[in-house]
Amino acid sequence: VQEIVLIGHSYGGVKIVYYQAQRQDPRVVGLVLASPGPINLARFREPELLEQAHQFVAQGRGSELLPPQTDGQPRPSAQTLLDRAAAAIDVFGAETSNPAIAQVSGPVLAFYGTREDQTMTAAALERIRRHVAGGRVETRLIDGAVHSYLRTESAVASAIAEWMDSALAAPEIDRLIQVKQTQEVGSAFRPAREASMMRELVRRHRGILPLDTIESIWRVIISTFTYVQAP
């Protein structure tokens, strides 16, 4: 695998930001954060909740879920809460001036659902926008979505696909411009990209012109113009 996009939901968003900040994995070309959190680590330090979690574990009930939050959102198991409290990392800058998200150089897409706590989501998205390196971040709200994105999966998929088409194309375009302006030897051909474009042509085809004719014309156009992009 040469290029990948990491997608993390909820606490998974925290994990992928931390991973990329620590590893600077060259294969990772972007991050997608779906309802990332928690942004505010104070929720892991609530004395009463921690005491309750310790009691559950002492009673051999560490795998049981703690009582839900006041808004009805579920809490993790007692043992999970204690593990997270022990390893809580401020990746979004709630308590530190140089959080992990500021060390991520690639583009980032972050979104929440409109049926989540809007005060919390607004603050979280603003914090992410402020800290992402180079400002290469896009934030969205998925209409009608709850934290789990149940029944809004297609809207999420569309948002991610649109973002990938725009945000991930920019670095490649910049590189081709640099190649054309120098004597650097570089290949502008991208077989996977060309195959994806051909599949889209097939999907959109509605006329009487045979597909093999369309393919032939398209190949001449794309190969010619792609060839002249590099010396």
Image: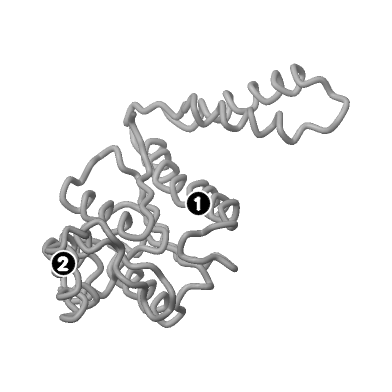
Mark 2, secondary structure of its residue? helix
Query: How far across and how far down the image is residue 119, in percent?
Result: 42, 82
Seen in the image, is 122 located left or right of residue 48? right
| Identity, as a three-letter code, of the amino acid under mark 2 | Ala
Q: CA distance from mark 2 to mark 1?
A: 31 Å
Tell me the mark number nearer the camera, choosing from 2 and 1: 2
Seen in the image, is 211 located left or right of residue 16? right
As drawn, which residue projects farthest toward the right? 208
Depth check, front residue: 125 or 185: 125
- State which quadrant residue 66 falls in: bottom left
Q: Earlier in the sequence, mark 2 or mark 1?
A: 2
Query: How far across and how far down the image is residue 230, in percent?
Result: 43, 30
Q: Residue at x 51, y 25 (%)?
A: 227
Q: Which residue is mark 2?
A: 85
Q: Which residue is mark 1?
A: 160
Query: How far across and how far down the image is residue 137, in percent?
Result: 39, 62
| Identity, as a three-letter code, of the amino acid under mark 1 | Ile
Q: Is residue 4 above or below residue 58?
A: above
Depth check, front residue: 155 or 202: 155
